[in-house]
Image: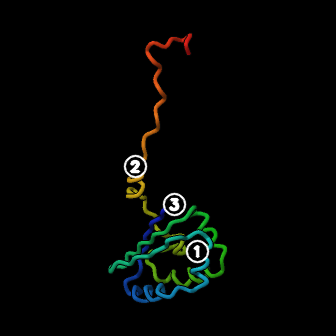
Amino acid sequence: MHRVCFTLQVRKDRMEEYAERHAAVWPDMLQALHDTGWHDYSLFLRDDGLLVGYLETPDLAAAQAGMARTDVNARWQAEMAEFFEDLDLPPDQGFWQLTEVFHLEDQLAALSTPPPAAAPAAHPTDTAQDQ
């Protein structure tokens, strides 16, 4: 599963309404997100309008393409576009994706994985004929 984190900037004068809209997302939008591979999806809004999104998906491009094929997404993106600053694309395509530089579970798993077993060394008394 690929972890994705992104940012957008919500207009300060629209933050309250933006949060209200996301408190009751349309059921068909929720189902479309789930069905097209948007899992563990969360949005976080800072008091200056910085929006941080996080999701897990097998393939972000496929998840975006799947949503682009739905009517509900076209309606939702059209309504949400007015909430953002400096956005030339629909919000689900115009976000700034962040590069992951640390993930606790990955590093813990790497620590607990034993190194691959080395091939046994030949005994010093072995000769080419014995092998």
Q: Categorize mark 2 by other alpha carbons within 10 Å: few (<14), some (14-19), many (20+).
A: few
Disc 1 and disc 2 in contact, CB within 8 angstroms: no
Amino acid found under the numbered disc labelled 3:
His
Q: Earlier in the sequence, mark 1 or mark 3?
A: 3
Residue 52 position within the rendered picture, expressed as x and y whole percent measured from the top left: 41, 72
Q: CA distance from mark 1 to mark 2?
A: 33 Å
The front one of 127 and 90 is 127
| Residue 41 % position (x, y) | 49, 73
Which mark is drawn over residue 112?
Answer: 2
* Residue type beneath disc 1: His
Q: Position of residue 53 (x, y in %)?
A: 44, 72
When asked about the image quadrant of residue 69, the answer is bottom right
* Residue where numbered disc 3 is placed: 2
Position of 91 compared to 47: left or right? Answer: right
Q: Tell me the residue that label 1 is attached to.
A: 34
Distance of label 1 from label 3 (alpha carbons): 15 Å
